């Protein structure tokens, strides 16, 4: 028969083992037996609210699909969202709340180049990954940041593609209007590269304020040198208002703007002034049913009753890539394990969009194509 001492000793071992198992399961911040908590700080209100709404609809639709199927290794994905009103200072404050108070596993999404730049030291200090920031600034690609995983193509690639397009159709008098911040400067760098590659000289380089710009004065300034085409690097509301001002003042040049403005809300806000505006895209079309990605997006959009738009497709893709990383990381989920899992994705086809990472490459996708807003307010490929 088992002595009392032996019984007590075995009971102690069982207790220690149980505690050890619980501690291991809950060892990583933001991870429990049943959930993975991710955080997002983004402009739910303010100048980018329209595209952000659609972006988050797409991401949420995919997370809903995953959670209905039991989650990732038995864990449901939960997301805490905080509104930073597209203010970099509030972005930093929100990120600190999500990391230090809410104890999220990682940050997901977010929007804005200066906004993302501002939180990088905080991520580094707390070893928190950031997946799918909605910015294509080259500063987040080179040098490679161990904690940051881009998905969308670079802004510079979008601008270069626009320059190539205009030059190909015979329009070589090209100007740029860019917002006066890090986003705008990055777009300007791409513009200069594209123009130099085609041996073209810019007609004009104009910048305007990110907060409360003078739309009418800016419109008059870009119209004056009479460019054949104008590339605009700015956020949704400011881009809408300056295009309206340009058209109202008689500016008839071709206009191209960036994928960050690709949303149904942007097109609706432009109204009649949107006809003919070229918009670069960084995902396949959301209604392209010839690809597995398009078919999956259609299923998710119907289930969650979301807007079918390029912005929603971007959010859907972002969530899909994140979940793939979580799956590859396995049941014993840690931040470092997740990073290694993301870096194991070598040219992974997500159903029509190729994404690739490695220890020295956190770019993700290089997909860029141009569309135009048609008379019916729909994007034409």
Image (tube, rainbow, N blue to C red):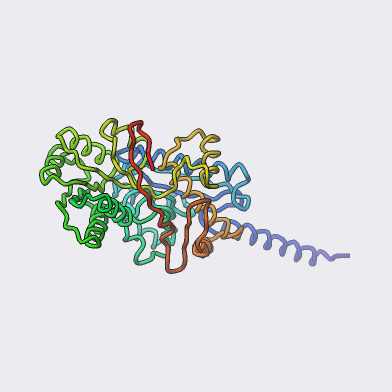
Query: Is residue 94 in view?
Result: no
**Viewer-side residue, 183 vs 225:** 225
The residue most toward the left is 224
Q: Is residue 296 left or right of residue 222?
A: right
**Viewer-side residue, 312 vs 110:** 312
Q: Position of residue 189 (x, y in %)?
A: 24, 59
Q: Is residue 238 left or right of residue 322?
A: left
Quadrant of res 6: bottom right
Name the residue at 47% across, 44% down: 59
Q: Position of residue 142 (x, y in %)?
A: 34, 65
Classify 137 as above or below 297: below
Name the residue at 34% across, 44% down: 84
Classify 49 as above or below 129: above
The residue most toward the bottom is 360
Q: Position of residue 14 (x, y in %)?
A: 72, 61
Q: Position of residue 272 (x, y in %)?
A: 27, 30
Query: Is residue 322 in view?
Result: yes
Q: Which image quarter is the N terminus in?
A: bottom right
**Viewer-side residue, 208 vs 34:** 208
Quadrant of res 86: top left
Q: Which image quarter is the C terminus in?
A: top left
């Amino acid at each position: 028969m088992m002595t009392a001492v032996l019984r007590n000793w075995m009971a102690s071992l069982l207790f220690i083992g149980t505690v050890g198992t619980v501690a291991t399961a809950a060892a990583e911040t933001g991870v429990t037996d049943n959930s993975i908590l991710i955080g997002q700080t983004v402009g739910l209100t303010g100048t980018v609210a329209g595209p952000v709404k659609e972006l988050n609809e797409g991401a949420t639709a995919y997370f809903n699909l995953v959670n209905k199927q039991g989650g990732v290794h038995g864990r449901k994905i939960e997301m805490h969202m905080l509104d930073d009103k597209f203010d970099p200072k509030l972005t930093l404050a929100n990120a600190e709340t999500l990391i230090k108070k809410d104890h999220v596993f990682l940050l997901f999404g977010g929007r804005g180049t200066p906004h993302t730049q501002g939180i990088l030291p905080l991520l580094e200090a707390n070893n928190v990954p950031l997946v799918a920031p909605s910015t294509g600034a080259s500063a987040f690609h080179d040098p490679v940041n161990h904690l940051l995983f881009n998905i969308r193509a670079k802004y510079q690639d979008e601008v270069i593609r626009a320059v190539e397009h205009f030059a190909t159709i015979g329009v070589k008098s090209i100007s740029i209007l860019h917002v006066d911040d890090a986003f705008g400067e990055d777009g300007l760098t791409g513009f200069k590269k594209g123009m130099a590659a085609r041996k073209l000289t810019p007609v004009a380089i104009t910048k305007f304020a990110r907060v409360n710009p003078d739309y009418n004065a800016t419109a008059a300034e870009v119209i004056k040198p009479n460019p054949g085409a104008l590339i605009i690097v700015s956020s949704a509301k400011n881009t809408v208002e300056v295009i309206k001002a340009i058209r109202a003042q008689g500016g008839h040049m071709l206009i191209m703007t960036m994928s960050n403005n690709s949303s149904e809300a942007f097109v609706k806000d432009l109204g009649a002034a949107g006809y003919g505006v070229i918009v670069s895209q960084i995902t396949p079309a959301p209604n392209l049913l010839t690809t597995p990605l398009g078919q999956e997006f259609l299923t998710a959009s119907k289930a969650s009753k979301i807007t079918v738009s390029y912005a929603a497709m971007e959010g859907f893709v972002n969530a899909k890539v994140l979940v793939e990383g979580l799956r590859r990381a396995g049941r014993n989920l840690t931040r470092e394990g997740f990073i290694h899992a993301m870096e194991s994705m070598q040219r992974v086809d997500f159903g029509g969009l190729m994404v690739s990472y490695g220890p020295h490459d956190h770019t993700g996708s290089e997909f860029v194509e141009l569309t135009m807003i048609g008379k019916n307010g729909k994007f034409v490929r």
